[in-house]
Image (spheres, rainbow, N blue to C red):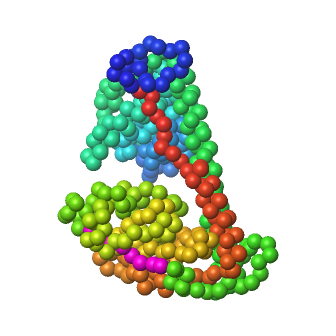
């Protein structure tokens, strides 16, 4: 919202009137609580009244829900549960505060909900407006434990409302964006499943020298090698003293575990100064190197896309051949997925690997031509996965 007129920065053409601030209680005609029928009475369960609990409502899923449980009329009458009319919004007010879902059909809920019915406005718009309000307040008190909100507190919250016609346009637009996000999410999930399957089938199983699926024209057995034999240059990093502020905040990217979120490592949350680099065991790992986590998230791996320093928690590998680099990266992804590092991990105060254990890791390697084909296949698959990876929800409705 802009402060000048209580209006959003971007609007549909033809709308200029300011949005009105209204209490949520003014936007609904009735509310419903919930309850849980006794689980010791089988006759209360397995009926035809959908019954939801807070765990059924997913974060940021305002219109989709799987409801595995249903109760009978007897269960409804012998508990505090109430049958809520369709076209209502179920808002979680206890465990999982801030989640909500719109339901077009009649339902009942546990005691963790307040349901808003007889909506006095566009249902899509109200869902997004209420969700944004609740989420913004949760973020304002981040770090504090919020055990719940009362019905009175919920109905007393203020939201901004445009005229009915603009509500409908905004609500429909937001719903269309959500549907597109859902479509991308489904494609993303399917591609991840395909990748996992192909990682299993395009690399030899333990004790075998050939994979189940190969590109046409390749028949030679794969050769077992140690990871250290394939690396041109390798080494861990170092961490400058956190007590010296002069060591941090410079122009040198400094890799942390949280910076690895996929194939390519393009940004780091922390940076070092030249002084910090010189006063530690850290070194400049060249762009294109593979970094493998040896502490904490053991086995997590990524390809550095800019010259970067790392802590001692990483083993960094430089290759003289890009196709071999990509092949090894993909094979190390499979190692993480299949928990292949477990026999190598030292346990104690912290699970970890060391450089010698990383270099001793055994892997089967095909000819350079076949490795190149495999690398290109998984690189293309990773590109598709990145394209469909879910982005944060756009839900700023004012």
Residue 384 screen position, x and y as percent: 63, 54
Residue 108 appearing in the image: no
Image check: 219 left or right of 71?
Answer: right
State whether residue 17 is above or below residue 340. above
Q: Is residue 183 magenta?
A: no
Q: Residue furthest left?
A: 243
Q: In the image shown, does 255 or 183 lie closer to the viewer?
A: 255
Task: Determine whether, in the image, residue 244 is placed left or right of residue 162.
Answer: left
> As rendered, which of 93 and 337 lies closer to the eye?
337
Taking the image as shown, residue 187 lies to the left or right of residue 90, namely right
Q: Measured along the vertical axis of the image, is residue 383 above or below residue 292?
A: above
Q: Position of residue 73 (x, y in %)?
A: 52, 37
Q: Residue at x 50, y 22 (%)?
A: 11
Residue at the spot 40% in from the left edge and 69% down from the top edge: 284
Above or below residue 99? Residue 269 is below
Residue 150 occupies quadrant: top left
> Would residue 254 be seen by someone viewing this image from the given angle?
yes
- Compare residues 247 and 149 and report the one nearer the observer: 247
In the image, residue 236 lies in the stretch drawn in magenta = yes
Query: Which residue is pictured at 60% across the width and 59% down the height?
Result: 382
Residue 247 location, x and y as percent? 25, 62
Image quadrant where one finds the N terminus: top left
Task: Please give the range of residues in magenta.
Answer: 233-240
Q: Residue 376, how many percent across, how many down?
A: 66, 65
């Amino acid at each position: 919202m802009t402060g000048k007129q209580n209006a959003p920065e971007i609007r549909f053409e033809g709308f200029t009137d300011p949005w009105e601030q209204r209490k949520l209680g003014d936007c609904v005609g009735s509310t419903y609580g919930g309850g849980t029928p006794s689980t010791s009475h089988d006759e209360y369960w397995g009926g035809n009244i959908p019954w939801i609990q807070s765990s059924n409502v997913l974060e940021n899923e305002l219109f989709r829900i799987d409801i595995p449980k249903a109760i009978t009329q007897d269960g409804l009458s012998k508990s505090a549960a109430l049958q809520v009319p369709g076209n209502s919004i179920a808002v979680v007010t206890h465990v999982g505060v801030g989640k909500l879902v719109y339901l077009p059909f009649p339902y009942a809920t546990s005691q963790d909900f307040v349901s808003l019915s007889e909506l006095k406005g566009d249902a899509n718009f109200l869902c997004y407006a209420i969700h944004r309000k609740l989420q913004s307040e949760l973020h304002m008190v981040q770090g504090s434990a919020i055990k719940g909100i009362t019905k009175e507190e919920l109905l007393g919250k203020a939201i901004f409302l445009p005229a009915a016609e603009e509500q409908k346009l905004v609500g429909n637009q937001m719903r269309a964006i959500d549907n597109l996000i859902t479509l991308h999410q489904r494609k993303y999930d399917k591609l991840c499943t395909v990748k996992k399957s192909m990682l299993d089938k395009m690399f030899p199983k333990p004790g075998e020298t050939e994979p189940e699926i190969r590109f046409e024209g390749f028949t030679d057995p794969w050769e077992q090698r140690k990871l250290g034999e394939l690396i041109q240059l390798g080494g861990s990093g170092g961490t400058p003293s956190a007590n010296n502020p002069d060591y941090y905040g410079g122009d040198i990217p400094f890799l942390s575990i949280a910076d690895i979120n996929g194939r390519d490592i393009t940004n780091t949350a922390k940076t070092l100064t030249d002084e910090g680099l010189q006063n530690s065991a850290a070194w400049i790992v060249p762009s294109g190197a593979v970094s493998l986590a040896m502490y904490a998230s053991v086995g997590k791996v990524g390809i550095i896309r800019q010259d970067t320093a790392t802590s001692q928690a990483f083993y960094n590998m430089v290759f003289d051949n890009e196709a071999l680099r990509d092949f090894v990266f993909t094979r190390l992804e499979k190692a993480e997925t299949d928990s292949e590092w477990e026999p190598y991990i030292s346990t104690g105060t912290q699970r970890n690997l060391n450089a010698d254990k990383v270099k001793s890791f055994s892997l089967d390697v095909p000819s350079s031509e076949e490795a190149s084909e495999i690398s290109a296949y998984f690189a293309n698959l990773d590109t598709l996965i990145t394209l469909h990876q879910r982005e944060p929800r756009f839900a700023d409705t004012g």
